[in-house]
Amino acid sequence: MLCWVLGVSPSDYWAWRKRAPSARARANEALTDRIVTIHANSRQTYGTPRIQAELAADGMRCGRMRLARLTRLAGVVGCHRRRGTVTTRRDPAALPAPDLVSRQFVAQAPNTRWTAETTQSQCP
């Protein structure tokens, strides 16, 4: 049924199943093993750019997108050690804003209390 849906003869399907992996698939497998080894040796800190530099230092040339695809498929993620940007610093001498609603946020009638909230999102 699957062969009929895909428009492939059964003999072609079984020939494909018995066929050895292509040279590109074998090279990808060997490269993935090398990527995982480099990542493990770097205490799991190296990402794609540093892994590519390591491969180049070893004499192995590999395209950036191919390397990114293989690292993603292998589940390899680099460590980001940069600190986040501090956007606001509180003045210790400043007085807090007055509590005009006495922490009672439920209004008795419409348009008698107005409150607002500001949130700052951080990008990962």
Image (cartoon, helix red, strand yellow):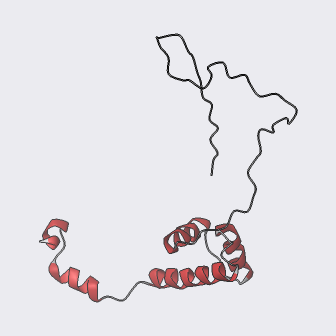
105 in relation to 81, above or below: above
Picture quarter containing residue 2? Answer: bottom left
| Residue 115: x %, y % from top left | 58, 21
| Residue 114: x %, y % from top left | 57, 17
Identity of the residue drawn at 71% across and 78% down: 54
Asked if residue 42 lies left or right of residue 107, the reply is right
Nearer the observer, 113 or 52: 113
Identity of the residue drawn at 27% across and 85% down: 17
Nearer the observer, 118 or 11: 118
104 in relation to 122, above or below: above
Identity of the residue drawn at 21% across and 81% down: 12
Picture quarter containing residue 97? Answer: top right
* Quadrant of the snapshot with the N terminus: bottom left
- Counting every numbered tag in the picture gives 0
| Residue 35: x %, y % from top left | 60, 79
Asked if residue 14 lies left or right of residue 75, the reply is left
Picture quarter containing residue 42? Answer: bottom right
| Residue 111: x %, y % from top left | 51, 10
Identity of the residue drawn at 68% across and 23% down: 99
Nearer the observer, 1 or 97: 97
Q: Please identify the residue farthest to the right as the structure is shown.
A: 93
51 in relation to 114, above or below: below
86 in relation to 57, above or below: above
